[in-house]
Image (tube, rainbow, N blue to C red):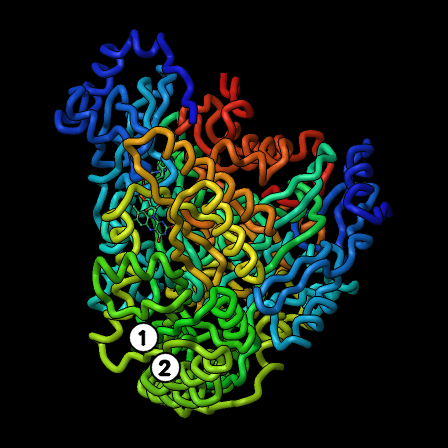
Amino acid sequence: MQMPQPDAGILGRREAIVARLAAALPADGLVSDPRELLAYDCDALTVYSCPPLAVTLPRSTEEVSAILRICHAEGVPVIPRGSGTGLAGGALPTADAVVLGVARLNAVLETNYADRYVRVQSGRTNLSVTGAVEPDGFFYAPDPSSQLACAIAGNIAMNSGGAHCLKYGVTTNNLLGVTMVMADGEVVEIGGPAMDAAGYDLLGVICGSEGQLGVVTEATLRILPKPEGARPILVAYDSAVTAGACVSDIIRAGVLPVAIEFMDKPIIHLTEAFVGAGYPMDAEALLIIEVEGSPAEIEEQLEKIKAIAETHHPTTLRESASEAQSKAIWAGRKAAFGATGQVADYLCMDGTIPTSALPETLGRMTQLAADYGLRVANVFHAGDGNLHPLIMFDANNPEELRKAEALGADILRLCVEQGGCLTGEHGVGVEKRDLMVHQYDPVDLEAQMGVKDVFDPKWILNPAKVFPLAASQGRGA
Amino acid sequence: MIEPRSEAEMAEAVAGLSAPVEVRGGGSRGALGRPVQAAETLSTGGLRGISLYEPGALTLVAGAGTPLREIEATLAAENQRLAFEPMDHRPLLGSGGEPTIGGVAACNVSGPRRVQAGACRDAMLGVRFVDGAGRVVKNGGRVMKNVTGYDLVKLMGGAYGTLGVLTELAFKVLPMPEAAATLVVRGLDDVSAVAAMTAALGSPFDVSGAAHLPDAGDPAAARTLVRIEGFQASVAYRAGRLRDLLTAQSRGEVEILSEAADLWADVRDVRGFADRPGAVWRISARPSDGPGLAASVPHLAARYDWGGGLLWLLTEESDAAAAAVRAAAARLRAHATLVRGPAALRASAGAFQPEAPALAAISAGLRAKFDPRGLLNPGRMSA
Ligand SMILES: Cc1cc2nc3c(=O)[nH]c(=O)nc-3n(C[C@H](O)[C@H](O)[C@H](O)COP(=O)(O)OP(=O)(O)OC[C@H]3O[C@@H](n4cnc5c(N)ncnc54)[C@H](O)[C@@H]3O)c2cc1C
C-alpha cells in the first residue's frame, strides 16, 4: 500500500500552520508535540501508521469550521477521526495532514420520544446513544461489535452495521439528518427530524462517504422502542454447506430473525479456548439465531426455526432457557475478534456475497488459504452474506504480512466474482482502495469522484482514500 | 418517442441527444415535479424484464421499464413482496399508464409501511443508469450490505430522472406476512389521533402502519388506523395489547379488522382526495408537528400517514395557498411537495420546497456533473 509523498511545501510551513490553528483553538484543542501525535498515527488497521502534522480536538461546530477554514486556505489535507476503531485505515494520517478528531463533541442535544429521534454530537459513542434513551424504553438500532468505543461520526462515515441489522438495517436506514462542515468551513444542515428531506438524497450519499465529503458534527438518529424480549438459539452442523442451506430455508419460510451469525470450526475452537462458552467442538459450522418479541412470540418463532433446523439434522441444537444461557450462547461470538487477537495478528476481511453463494465461497476460501499456507477463521453475518474472514499471520514477519494481504485481496476478488462486493460494513479506506478496480469500471469510479469534486473541489478531506491513487491523482489541483 | 431496446441502445440514444428530453417509464407519474420543457420523450419501456430473482436471498433485479405489476406478481407467487408498499399515483393524478419499477425508484415512492420497513430508497441495493453524457454507470450491487465506495444508489433514488436514466435496479424484498390486523379508533380529533398513533409507534408491538383519516363533515366519523403484521399468534397477541393501549389512550371503542387491504390502499394512494378538486400537498414533518401545521394553513381537507409525519393537504389551487403551505413547512423544518396541481401552478410555485442556498449549490453541482448538457428532465427537480 502506497500513500502519496507528503507535500514538502506544507511540511515547510508546519510552524506557521500550527500557529494559525493554535490561535483559533483553546490551548487543549491542539496537539503538536511529536510524542503525543503518535497516539493518532493509525486506526484499528494498525499495520499502517504515520503521525500527522498536528491533531485538533474541537469542542463545537464553530471550532470545526474554524479549523477547516484554515486548512482550506492553507491547502492542508484534513483527516476526520472519530474513535479510531476503523478497520480499513480510513483515519490513517499522512505527515502533511491535520487530524480533526471529534471525540470531545459527545453531548446529547435533544431526545424526542414522541417523534422517535435523538440528536447527538457526532463524537458520542454508539453504545452511549442507546444508553441515553434506554431508561425510557428506546434504543438506537445499529450495533457494531465495536459499539462501546466507536463514535457515531465513524458509523456515519462508514455506514456501519451490526449483528442486528438483518432486521433493523444499517446506519443509513437509521439516520435522519446531520450538521456537517464543508471543506471550506461552511456549515450545512442536511435532512432533519422528519422522515425524508427535500431535494436529492444528499444524506444517503454522505452516509458511507468515509469522511471525504464533509465533517459531520451532529446527527439526528431514529430511535426505536425496545422489544419486549429477545432469545437466541444455537444450531450446529457437520458441514458449512448444510448450515448455509438452513439459513436460506429460514429466510424463505418468512421468519425474519434479528440476527443470524455464522461461525466456522477454526473460530469455534479459538473462542472456546478464550472464553469457554461451551460451544460444540465437533461442529464444522455453528449458527446463532436470535428472535425478538413477547415470550409467546419468541416461542412461536423459535418453534418454526427449530423445525427448519431439524430437517437439516443438526449435531447440536441448544435453546436458551435463561438470561444467563442467552449470554453464554453469545459469549463466544462476541469474543471472536479478541480470541483471534490472542493467538495471532489478523486481518479482518469484510466482503459480502449473495447468501446463495455461501457454500461455494467458503469452500474456495479454504482452498485459497491452504495455497498461501495461512490460517483463516470465519465469523460473519450469515443472514445478509457479510463475511468476516480473519486471516492470521505474524506481523513481525514482513513476508507473512505480504502473503496475508495477498490472500485478503484474493478473497475479496472472490466475493466480487460471486456477485458480491469488497466491503459490507468496514469501508474501503486505504485497505481496499486499490481493489476498487475489480468491482468498478473507470466510469463508475469517475461518477463517484465527481461527487467529491462537487463537495470538496480542492480534495483536502481525507484524500488518498477510497479511490485508487492512480485514478484520483491530480484531482483537486 | 425514443424507446431504446437495450441499455447499450439507451447509452447511444442519450449520447446522441441534441435537445432536452422528458424521461418516461410508464407515464403514470409524469405529472410529478415541475413541468419539463422538452419536445422529445425518452422511454425506458424497452428495458423490460426480471433478470434475477432469488427468493432465498431476498433479492430481485429487473430492468427499469419492467411493470411494477409484473414484479409484484412474481414476488407474490413466492409469497414475497416489496416491503415499502409503493403508492399508485394514478387515482390521485388521474393519469393512465402502467407504473414501472424505474419510476418507483426515480421518485422514491413509498407507502404507509415506511414507518416500519423504510422507504423505497432503503430497499434499493443497486442501480445501473445512463448519465447525461451517455455513459453507463453502475453503483451498489445485489447484496444486502455494501459500503464499497459512495452510495449513488441513494442519490439516484428520488432524483426524478434528472441525474441519469435508470436502466436496471436491484431490490431487497421481504416475505409476505402470514396475518395482519388493523385497529380502528373512531372520532378522534387530529391532535388526539397523532397522540394515539405515537403511543402505538412507541410501543414494542412493531406497528407497520399508522394513519388518520379525518372527516371534515362529521368529526365522529374520523378514523385512526394502526396496522400490525406477522405470524398468526403474534398478530393476535399484539392486537390485544394495542387495543388496550389505544383504549386507554383515546377512551373510545377500538375495532379490530383482520382484512383491511382496501383501507390501506386508500391511505397509500390518498384516494379520498382523488375525486376532489384542489391542489394536493405532501408534507413531511415531525409527527407531533402535523396537526399544528395543518391548522396553520387554510385547507379543504387533511389526511395523515406515518403516524402523523406525512401530512396530505388539499388546498385551493393558488400561489397564495402555495406560499402559505411552504412558509408553514419552513417554520417547522418540514418540507412540502406539490404533488397535484395545474402545470401553471407547478411552474410558478415549484413542486419542491426550496433548498437552503448551500444545498441548492450542491444540487446544481451534481446536476452539472451527471448531466452536463442539461438534457434529462431539465427543471423537474428545481424548486
Ligand atoms: C473489534 C472491532 C469490531 C468491529 N465491529 C464492527 C461491526 O460489527 N460492524 C461495523 O460496521 N464495523 C465494525 N468495526 C469497524 C469500526 O468500529 C467502524 O467502522 C466504526 O464505525 C468506526 O468508528 P470510529 O468512530 O472509530 O471511526 P474512525 O476509525 O475514527 O474513522 C472511520 C472513518 O470515519 C471518518 N470520520 C470520522 N469522524 C468523522 C466525522 N466527524 N465526519 C466525517 N467523517 C468522519 C474517518 O475519516 C474514517 O474514514 C469494528 C472494529 C473493531 C476494532
Is residue B332 among the parts visible in the rendering? no
- Element under disc 2: helix
Badge 2 amino acid: Ile
Q: Can residue A395 be seen in this view?
A: yes
Q: Name the residue under label 2.
A: A298
Residue at 39% x, 29% y is: A462
Front residue of B345 and B248: B248
Quadrant hosting residue B142:
bottom right
- The residue sitting at 72% across, 49% down in the picture is B167
Residue B117 place in picture, x, y as percent:
49, 66
Q: In this view, does B311 lie above or below B166?
A: below
* Label whose residue precedes the other's in the sequence (2 or 1): 1
Q: Residue under label 1, please give it.
A: A230
Q: Of helix, strand and loop, which one carries label 1? A: strand
Find ligand 1 in the image and state its quadrant.
top left
* Residue B208 vertical placement versus A49 (above, below): below
Residue A334, quarter of the rendered image: bottom left
